[in-house]
């Protein structure tokens, strides 16, 4: 595995590897993706293998422009209301941290979609991702570049540490600015449904399509693949507590605390010395900054000399919902 800078020559090299069936990790605005040629079933199989990802969990196909979307998805197969909603969402939020579930074209390999009649499509807003997709095969399948179930990578070093030689090349584009994965919205049915909270907030989605609903995680019949509770998890145990509850915490082992803001750190009060380290997601209590720092800090704490991570939930609004979703899933590892 080699790490290169996103120079013209570097991108040419990466595109060549993708075109010949290899795997390239690359930055997007959300997290690093583990990319393979979306048209090549062998490359897709290598992605599942490299991540140790179960084959029932489908991939996101990344395109660089609306023209390529038509190669991947069949918008004409949507019911009229959904077609309007899909169009409005693309217009408002693409390129950006939004993935849409759409009817798939038959030429998209079944491996990409785990045999589903729908395909997840995203137009990322990161110059390196866009250039790479355009230079290679026009459609790049890319899950987050982490082993299945583990913390998502927001830096090239995270990918190198986690995947090593299971990836042929890593394009180092620095830190991912959004820091949590894209919001996944299923527009393939009559009512648009958020399957995964992410970098684009529900409030912003509803400002464009007010009728969007949110998948009910307490519903026992899973409507979305890949929604296993134990995801995004560090190796250390992560305990998730309500805001303010760390003040009463009595960790029995060497623990690190992760709080939302400076006020959260102050609230720790007498409990602070009981933690071996205290980290703050955003000093000023800015949810966008908290999301950008989330996986970075979890990687740091997971690599540190702690037995446990105790984290406080953040305010459940805007992108804070995605932060809470990731913390909740990280806490469910057993
Ligand atoms: O921000 C992101 O979305 C990152 C970057 C690299 O683009 N990618 C990412 O991919 O998070 P991944 O594979 O970790 O998550 C894809 C999610 C999974 O929850 C998967 O189950 C869902 O999208 N998904 C994919 N295809 C689907 C489909 N046809 N129907 C429903 N959900 C689907
Ligand atoms: Mg993932």
Image: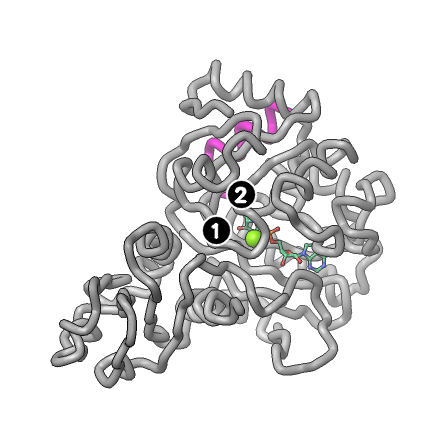
Q: Position of residue 265 (x, y in %)?
A: 18, 71
- The answer to whether residue 318 is left or right of residue 71 is left
Whether residue 167 sits left or right of residue 271 in the image: it is: right
Are the residues tagged 1 and 2 within 8 Å (C-beta)? yes
* Label 1 CB less than 8 angstroms from ligand 2: yes
* Numbered label attached to residue 152: 1
Residue 196: horizontal and vertical position, in percent?
A: 58, 65
- Closest to the observer: 142 or 235? 235
Residue 243 image offset from top left, x and y in percent? 31, 80
Label 1 crowd (10 A; few <14 / some 14-19 / many >=20): many
- 149 versus 70 height, above or below: below
Which residue does the image show at 42% across and 19% down from the upper left? 7
Question: In screen coordinates, is 286 left or right of 34?
Answer: left
Q: Which of marks 1 and 2 is nearer the N terminus?
A: 2
Q: Tell me which secondary structure the magenta stretch mostly adopts.
A: helix
Disc 2 residue: CB within 8 Å of ligand 1: yes
Q: Residue at x 67, y 58 (%)?
A: 86
Image quadrant where residue 142 sits: top right
- Image point (46%, 39%), residue name: 159
Q: Name the residue under label 2.
A: 145
Q: Is mark 2 on a helix, strand or loop?
A: loop
User: Which range of residues does the magenta coloring cover?
Assistant: 125-136
Q: Is residue 207 visible?
A: no
Residue at image coords 43%, 70%: 324
């Amino acid at each position: 595995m080699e790490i290169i800078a996103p120079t013209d020559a570097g991108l040419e090299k990466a595109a060549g590897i993708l075109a010949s069936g290899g795997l390239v990790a690359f930055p997007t605005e959300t997290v690093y993706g583990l990319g393979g040629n979306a048209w090549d079933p062998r490359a897709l199989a290598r992605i599942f293998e490299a991540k140790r990802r179960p084959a029932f969990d489908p991939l996101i196909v990344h395109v660089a422009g609306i023209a390529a979307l038509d190669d991947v998805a069949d918008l004409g197969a949507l019911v009229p209301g959904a077609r309007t909603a899909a169009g409005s969402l693309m217009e408002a939020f693409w390129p950006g941290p939004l993935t849409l579930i759409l009817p798939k074209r038959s030429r998209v390999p079944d491996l990409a979609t785990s045999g589903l009649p729908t395909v997840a499509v995203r137009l990322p807003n990161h110059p390196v991702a866009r250039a790479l997709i355009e230079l290679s095969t026009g459609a790049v399948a890319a899950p987050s570049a982490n082993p299945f179930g583990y913390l998502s990578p927001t830096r090239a070093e995270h990918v190198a540490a986690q995947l090593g030689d299971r990836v042929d090349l890593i394009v180092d584009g620095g830190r991912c600015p959004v820091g949590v994965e894209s919001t996944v919205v299923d527009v393939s049915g009559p009512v648009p449904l958020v399957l995964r909270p992410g970098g684009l907030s529900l409030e912003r989605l509803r400002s464009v399509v007010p009728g969007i609903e949110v998948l009910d995680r307490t519903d026992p019949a899973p409507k979305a693949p890949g929604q296993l509770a134990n995801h995004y998890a560090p190796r250390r145990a992560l305990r998730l507590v309500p805001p303010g509850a760390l003040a009463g915490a009595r960790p029995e082992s060497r623990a690190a605390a992760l709080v939302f803001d400076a006020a959260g750190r102050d609230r720790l009060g007498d409990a602070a010395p009981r933690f071996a380290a205290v980290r703050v997601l955003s000093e000023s209590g800015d949810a966008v900054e908290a999301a950008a720092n989330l996986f970075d800090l979890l990687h740091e704490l997971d690599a540190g000399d702690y037995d446990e991570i105790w984290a406080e939930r953040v305010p459940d609004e805007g992108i804070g919902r995605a932060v809470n979703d990731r913390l909740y899933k990280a806490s469910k590892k057993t």
